[in-house]
Image (cartoon, rainbow, N blue to C red):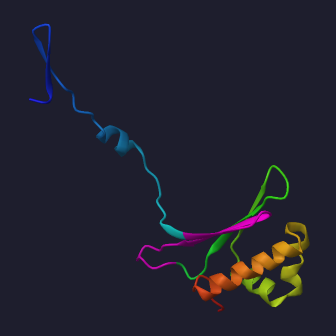
């Protein structure tokens, strides 16, 4: 038998690991998502699309934005589709935050990301 061993004439049986107590005591919410990462030497844009309970995905994505120009890097979470479209359209109110967040090259990168996410169906005008 593979689960027994003899030591000095005594037979010992391998104990089975009890995982039920451990797994039953842990309660976590799980979220499935798909993601895309766009990265340059200055910025990183990590887009996530959350799966709903019915297996479909949300209509809009969120973006974790990382400014890598200084250490420690700064992260912001962008999740307002109206703001994304406002940036794309050059809306004055949406554009107010941009100079604090990124340089002109970063704005070009953000516009590229937004356009790509629209093309992929991750962002939709309502």
The magenta stretch spans which residues? 35-57
- x%, y% of residue 71? 82, 50
Q: Is residue 81 above or below residue 70?
A: below
Q: Is residue 38 magenta?
A: yes
Q: Nearer the viewer, residue 35 or 56?
A: 35
Whether 119 is drawn above or below 7: the answer is below
Q: Residue 19: which quarter of the image?
A: top left
Image quadrant occupied by the N terminus: top left
Q: Residue furthest top?
A: 8
* Rendering quarter of residue 80: bottom right
Nearer-the-camera pick, 5 or 63:
5
What residue lies at 58% left-to-right and 85% top-to-bottom? 120
Quadrant, the C terminus = bottom right
Q: Image check: 13 left or right of 83?
A: left
Taking the spot 87% from the left edge, 80% from the top edge, the residue there is 95
Residue at 36% x, 39% y is 22
The answer to whether residue 80 is magenta is no
């Amino acid at each position: 038998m593979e689960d027994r061993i003899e030591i000095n004439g005594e037979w010992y049986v391998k104990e089975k690991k009890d995982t039920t107590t451990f797994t039953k005591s842990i309660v976590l919410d799980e979220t499935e998502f798909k993601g895309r990462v766009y990265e340059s030497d200055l910025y990183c844009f990590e887009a996530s699309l959350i799966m709903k309970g019915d297996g479909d995905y949300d209509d809009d994505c969120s973006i974790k934005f990382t400014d890598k120009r200084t250490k420690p890097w700064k992260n912001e979470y962008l999740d307002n589709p109206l703001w994304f479209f406002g940036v794309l359209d050059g809306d004055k109110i949406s554009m107010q935050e941009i100079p604090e967040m990124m340089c002109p090259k970063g704005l070009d990168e953000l516009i590229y990301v937004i356009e790509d996410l629209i093309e992929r169906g991750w962002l939709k005008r309502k």
